[in-house]
Amino acid sequence: MKARLIIGGALVLALFALPAVADPAGQASDLRAAIFAAPAGACALPMASKTGGPGGVGAASVCTAHCWDGSTRTCTGTSCTADDSSCPSQRGNCWSNAEGTKYCPQCSSPTCDASTTCINGSSVYCQGTSGDCFSYYQCYAYCDGNYHLCSGPLPQVCPP
């Protein structure tokens, strides 16, 4: 019985020693460490995916103004606004807290004017900024959607 115990113990020791004999450089221990180690990055905090602030942290905002001539103005920062062109009165622009204000080109709407002489000798006159102006003799002057009528008697027919 003693012999069996000694042979069994020797066999167990040989089994434990086998990886060290087969892998003298220690690769087996490296393999065991890799298998039983925690997953890489298990305790790492997620990184911010948006750029904008120091170190890539912070939400970036992008605002674009569409200009009357087909161009655009784009502003980027953590806060921004944009207004499209609406000529002749609204020049487009964008603003951001990082870049300030960027303006669209000045509106270049053609100016026009219209005038007519009325029956009573007076005249009416208007000036427009949209290029939409005309007059009808002895009736009215028309500019940018507004009719400027002669005062006093009007002819029988004043077309619209």
Image (cartoon, grey):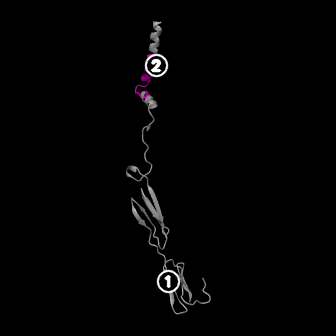
Q: Position of residue 109 (x, y in %)?
A: 48, 76
Disc 2 marks which residue?
A: 15
Q: Position of residue 96 (x, y in %)?
A: 41, 60
Q: Crowding near pointer 2: few (<14 within 10 Å), some, many (20+)?
A: few
Of the residues under marks 2 and 1, which one precedes in the sequence? 2
Image: magenta residue range = 12-28
Q: Position of residue 68 (x, y in %)?
A: 49, 70
Looking at the figure, which quarter contains the C terminus?
A: bottom right
Circle 2 sits in a helix, a strand or a loop, which is it? helix
Q: Give the answer, above or below, for where 114 lies relative to 36.
A: below
Q: Crowding near pointer 1: few (<14 within 10 Å), some, many (20+)?
A: many
Depth check, front residue: 108 or 37:
108
Q: Quadrant of residue 42?
A: top left
Q: Give the answer, above or below, for where 144 lies relative to 44.
A: below
Q: Residue at x 46, y 60 (%)?
A: 63
Circle 1 sits in a helix, a strand or a loop, which is it? strand
Disc 1 marks which residue?
A: 126
Identify the amino acid type marked 2. Leu
Residue 89 located within the stretch drawn in magenta: no
Most frequent secondary structure within the magenta stretch: helix
From mark 2 to mark 1, how far is it between C-alphas?
Answer: 108 Å
Depth check, front residue: 142 or 18:
142
Callouts 2 and 1 close, C-beta under 8 Å:
no
Q: In this rendering, which labeled residue sits more in front, label 2 or label 1?
A: 1
Depth check, front residue: 141 or 155:
155
Residue 25 located within the stretch drawn in magenta: yes
Count of labels in the image: 2
Identify the amino acid type marked 1. Cys
Depth check, front residue: 74 or 155:
155
